Image (spheres, rainbow, N blue to C red):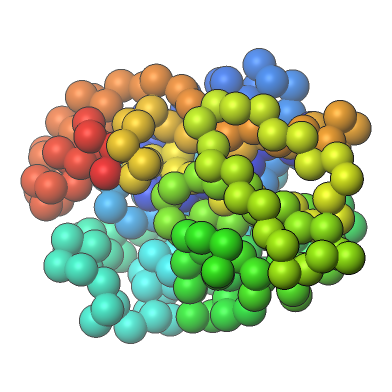
Amino acid sequence: MRIGILGDIHGNAEALRAVVAAMRRDSVDTWVQVGDIVGYGPEPSVCIDIVRELGCVTCLGNHDAAVLGLLDTSYFNNFARAAIHWTTPRLRPSDLEFLRSLPLVVKRPEFTVVHGTLHMPDQFGYVISKVEAIDSLELQETRLCFVGHSHVPAVYLRRDRFPGEIVEKPQSEVEVSYRGYERVLMNVGSVGQPRDEDPRAAYGLVDTEREVAWVKRVHYDIAGVQRKIREAGLPEVLANRLALGV
């Protein structure tokens, strides 16, 4: 089985379309999305439509929760908060209904999906190093788990007989074999707003037969999205950061 994993989309339809086209070329069998379909970007409803049409296995992200009024935005930075205030009144009733239907954690026989961490899914904590990965891996019941939230891709590997020895594989379109590891926690980065100083859209791909994982990158029309952000009246920094991958 080939699993294609969409990271944080954040209303960036240009990036999403480019990634979906690449994933189709990769012959994806199962589509996954790790939350934060909305927030920051200028086309939240378009992105929701694409995710729904793909039939993605999807969980709730913190920005998705924020537009539903389920999460206090006081801890968001000013630009993120402004984007939530811009996004919320522009969502259709069907958008809100879909987001409201998303669980914090989705578990399938082959994999688990959560936006931040398994040990605090409702707190939307970050997996940014082996320190945070240990706690989630301890609760991970499936061999594979897909997360996002930090917008920085990485793969964490664990053998059950050595639970404290986590192998971290930073990702940059590099093939990672997870053969011989019982637990694989994969942060797939971000489709719509990468923060690893690579502005290309990111997505995850896993081949369960070969036991191999990749985070792949795709070029997209960044200037076009920047124009839409500015025309929408969203904060200028949200446009500028796309070209820098930060």
The answer to whether 93 appears left or right of 59 in the picture is: left
Vertical placement of residue 182 versus 76, above or below: above
The answer to whether 60 appears left or right of 146 in the picture is: left
* Along the viewing direction, whichever of 84 and 146 lies nearer the viewer: 146
Vertical placement of residue 106 versus 167, above or below: below
The residue that appears at 55% across and 69% down in the rendered structure is: 131
The residue that appears at 61% across and 50% down in the rendered structure is: 168
The residue that appears at 82% across and 65% down in the rendered structure is: 162
Q: Residue furthest top?
A: 25
The answer to whether 154 appears left or right of 183 in the picture is: left
Image quadrant in which you'd find residue 246: top left
Quarter of the rendering occupied by the N terminus: top right
Q: Position of residue 60 (x, y in %)?
A: 55, 66
Q: Position of residue 72 (x, y in %)?
A: 33, 83
User: How many numbered callouts?
Assistant: 0
* Along the viewing direction, whichever of 186 and 18 lies nearer the viewer: 186
* Along the viewing direction, whichever of 199 and 158 lies nearer the viewer: 158
Vertical placement of residue 185 versus 193, above or below: below
Q: Position of residue 36 (x, y in %)?
A: 45, 57
The residue that appears at 74% across and 22% down in the rendered structure is: 27
Residue 96 appears in the figure: no
* Along the viewing direction, whichever of 140 and 70 lies nearer the viewer: 140
Q: Position of residue 243 (x, y in %)?
A: 22, 31
Residue 187 appears in the figure: yes
